[in-house]
Image (spheres, grey):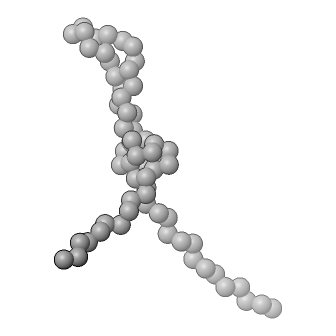
Amino acid sequence: MAQRSLAPTRICPDCDGFPAVAIDTGTLLEDGTRATLRVTCRRCRGTGSTCTAAPAPVTQREHA
């Protein structure tokens, strides 16, 4: 029986598919844990993949 295959997703070139990271600030909190910041990729907005842009429309020029 044939299996359906999904279209391959394009991995974001800015984050290489790792859209969210935790950055350690170096500050210790009162409970002994480190304060971290969660940052997401600006280009893919945290999805890890990008969609392909629609091709530009072809325009024809009139010759005078």
Quadrant in the picture for the N terminus: bottom left
| Outermost residue, left side | 1
Residue 35 seen in the current view: yes
**Residue at x 40% of width, y 18% of height:** 25
Q: Position of residue 28 (x, y in %)?
A: 32, 10
**Residue at x 26% of width, y 72% of height:** 4
| Outermost residue, front side | 1
| Outermost residue, right side | 64
Residue 42 seen in the current view: no
Depth check: 9 or 4 in front? 4
Q: Position of residue 58 (x, y in %)?
A: 61, 79
Quadrant in the picture for the C terminus: bottom right
| Outermost residue, bottom side | 64
Q: Position of residue 50 (x, y in %)?
A: 43, 55
Q: Residue 56 occupies which quadrant of the picture? A: bottom right
- The number of callouts visible is 0
Depth check: 64 or 12 in front? 12
Depth check: 30 or 32 in front? 32
Q: Note whether 58 is above or below 21 in the view shown.
A: below
Q: Position of residue 51 (x, y in %)?
A: 43, 60
Q: Note whether 53 is above or below 13 in the view shown.
A: below
**Residue at x 29% of width, y 68% of height:** 5
**Residue at x 21% of width, y 10% of height:** 31
